[in-house]
Image (cartoon, rainbow, N blue to C red):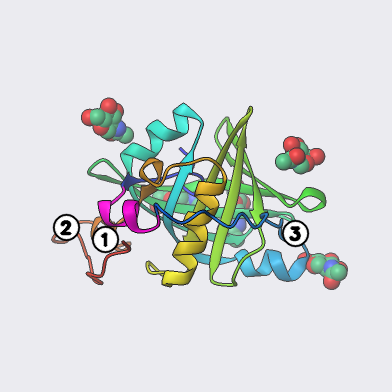
Amino acid sequence: MLAFLVPVFILSMGMVHAHATESPTCTPLVPAEMDNATVDRLLGHWVYIMGASQYPPHVAEMKELKHATFTFFPGSHEDELNATEIMRLNETCVVRNTSKIHIFRHNSTLAHVEGQEVSMAELIHSDKDLFILKHFKDNHVGLSLSARTPEVTKEQLEEFEAQLRCHGFKLEEAFITSPKDACPAAGEEKGEGSTATAESQLG
Ligand SMILES: *[C@@H]1O[C@H](CO)[C@@H](O)[C@H](O)[C@H]1NC(C)=O
Ligand SMILES: *[C@@H]1O[C@H](CO)[C@@H](O)[C@H](O)[C@H]1NC(C)=O
Ligand SMILES: *[C@@H]1O[C@H](CO)[C@@H](O)[C@H](O)[C@H]1NC(C)=O
Ligand SMILES: *[C@@H]1O[C@H](CO)[C@@H](O)[C@H](O)[C@H]1NC(C)=O
Ligand SMILES: *[C@@H]1O[C@H](CO)[C@@H](O)[C@H](O)[C@H]1NC(C)=O
């Protein structure tokens, strides 16, 4: 499973009708320029916020994925990152620390490698505190939004939702995570369940 690719949770209805009557302004997504600064910017902790995919196996994975965070570390060379992923699949928290990200600078592509499974996504130019990917699988496209924190601004959310619509997704086809499904922090697995903090809703 590709946590950073495609996770999560049936969309709250609030978001669905919010912009239904607006025609989206389809600003083309711009691939990030993959220099050292961009690669450095990827390091550290991210929270998966929402995503959508046309690829049925990814849609199935997203349905199970209730929450995901991931951390990128420097890998064995400058175009490789190690990744640790913590995700809640259905009810169960799972930790993966064997994934790698291969960076193809010439085409702004990140390849997520976990065991035999490889998935490709283009890194999209965005605000510094966002991590936006355009996923490719055969002829299927997906989009995902992750951020440094469990919350994004209204403007960031609306911009991403507009991109979903521009890529032919209905908002109700998007999967969104909820902070209440966060897994306990490392070392707290035997604690009292969810460590939900912020109660605020994305929608
Ligand atoms: C990018 O970083 C690598 C080491 O991580 C270094 O060898 C290389 O010179 C850097 N490139 C630029 C353009 O600074
Ligand atoms: C990255 O993972 C490799 C094993 O795949 C390991 O040898 C290396 O120490 C890891 N690097 C870091 C910084 O954890
Ligand atoms: C999650 O639940 C669904 C439906 O009950 C089930 O088909 C699937 O195998 C479960 N996935 C995991 C990883 O437990
Ligand atoms: C992954 O986690 C296991 C269990 O905590 C640990 O033994 C192993 O060294 C970790 N591997 C990496 C690459 O961090
Ligand atoms: C980017 O380049 C890599 C390596 O050349 C290739 O495998 C991958 O398919 C390319 N990605 C896209 C989106 O074209």
Q: Is residue 114 above or below residue 155?
A: above
**Mark identifier at residue 193:** 2
- Tell me what residue is drawn at x 56 percent, y 61 percent: 131
**Residue contact at pointers 1 and 2, CB within 8 angstroms:** yes
Residue type highlighted by circle 3: Glu
Which residue lies most toward the left here? 192
- Tell me what residue is drawn at x 40 percent, y 45 percent: 174
Residue type highlighted by circle 2: Gly
- Tell me what residue is drawn at x 78 percent, y 53 percent: 105
Residue corresponding to mark 3: 78
Q: Is residue 142 above or below residue 129?
A: above
In front: 108, or 142?
A: 142
**Mark identifier at residue 49:** none
Upstream in sequence: badge 1 or badge 2: 1
Q: CA distance from mark 1 to mark 2?
A: 7 Å
Quick one: label 1, few (<14), some, or many (20+) residues within 10 Å? some
**Residue contact at pointers 1 and 3, CB within 8 angstroms:** no
**Residue contact at pointers 2 and 3, CB within 8 angstroms:** no
CB of residue at label 3: within 8 Å of ligand 1?
yes
Residue corresponding to mark 1: 184
Q: What's drawn in magenta, residue-wise?
A: 11-19
Q: CA distance from mark 2 to mark 3?
A: 38 Å
Rendering coords of residue 72 (x, y %): 56, 60
One can see residue 38 in this view: yes
In front: 70, or 22?
A: 22
Upstream in sequence: badge 1 or badge 3: 3
Residue 136 falls left or right of residue 130: right
Q: Secondary structure at mark 2?
A: loop
Upstream in sequence: badge 2 or badge 3: 3
